[in-house]
Amino acid sequence: MSHSMTRAGQIEAALLASLQESATLQDSAVIQDSQVQGVTLCAAQSRKLPGMSGTGLIERPVSWVALAGFMGTGKSRIGWELSRALALHFVDTDKLITRVVGKSIPEVFAQEGEGYFRACEAEVVQRVTRLEHAVISLGGGTFIHEENRRTLLERGPVVVLWASPETVYQRTRHSDRPLLRVDDPLGRIRSLMDERESVYREGTIHVHSDGRPSEELVEEIIERLWGWQGGSGWPPSQPLLVSDRATDGRASD
């Protein structure tokens, strides 16, 4: 059996465990029973939510959405809150990879190399885009790679979260992120954000997380998803210039 096949099986097992945990944590969310490529999603207990139709079914703008953006923009936190609001499963791709590999992200970079990590990441993207009823939080570099980006955008809407370099630095300065192991981490953040901005702009919807509570961000994302689902093209979703962004943020990864 090849290493790729072995890893595919590990991803499948890790994903199933993540979905089961999500259903357990979403103890008052409505998750429909589904079966995707041999993985059965668990149903959770139901509750009444705003937007529930007369049939008792939750009205959602989408049943699948991904969150992309630079590290520290709030993808994990907002993704989880969004999944609760929409009664969907939540999958964090970085956490899924650490579960598959059995190592932290910094350990994977240090011991296996970035190439190995990106290969795992690409396989995870292929797998999570086959899910239904899920909110997917992507790693900061996932959307940068063209094949991942194409796969994700073909699957459904990708919400890009934005924050100023200063906010990102404040949120990540105590973490052990491989890309920030430099003498000037803030300068590194600015440089990387400049390099990636044009790619992040290819996302479907753009939301700014600086200085805003998660509840407000989730409400805006859902409103924009309804607009996207209706094909209205509203509201316009171009990110603000860096100089226009606030420097204090609450929604961290």
Image: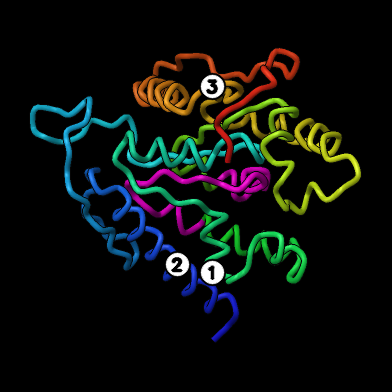
Asked if 27 appears above or below 36 in the picture, the reply is above
Spot occupied by residue 143 in the image (x, y as percentages of width and height):
62, 43
Answer with mark 1 or mark 3, whichever residue precedes in sequence.
1
Q: Is residue 62 left or right of residue 153?
A: left
Q: Under tag 1, what secondary structure?
A: helix
* Residue range of the region highlighted in magenta in the rendering: 126-150
Q: Under tag 2, what secondary structure?
A: helix
Residue furthest front as drawn? 174
The residue type indicated by label 2 comes to Ala
Residue denoted by label 3: 212
**What residue is shown at x 34% (from left), y 64% (from top)?**
37
**What residue is shown at x 67% (from left), y 62% (from top)?**
117
Whether the magenta-drawn stretch holds residue 211 is answered as: no
Q: Quadrant of the C terminus?
A: top right
Q: Residues within 10 Å of mark 1 (few under 14, many from 20)?
A: many
The residue type indicated by label 1 comes to Val
The numbered dot on residue 14 is 2
**What residue is shown at x 73% (from left), y 70% (from top)?**
112
> Do the residues bearing badges 3 and 2 touch, measured as CB atoms within 8 Å?
no
Spot occupied by residue 250 in the image (x, y as percentages of width and height):
57, 28
Answer with mark 1 or mark 2, whichever residue precedes in sequence.
2
The numbered dot on residue 100 is 1
> Do the residues bearing badges 1 and 2 touch, measured as CB atoms within 8 Å?
yes
Q: From the viewer's perspective, is the residue at label 3 or at label 2 nearer?
A: 3
Spot occupied by residue 246 in the image (x, y as percentages of width and height):
67, 17
Q: Residues within 10 Å of mark 2 (few under 14, many from 20)?
A: some
Spot occupied by residue 153 in the image (x, y as percentages of width and height):
51, 40
> Do the residues bearing badges 1 and 3 touch, measured as CB atoms within 8 Å?
no
Q: Is residue 23 left or right of residue 150?
A: left
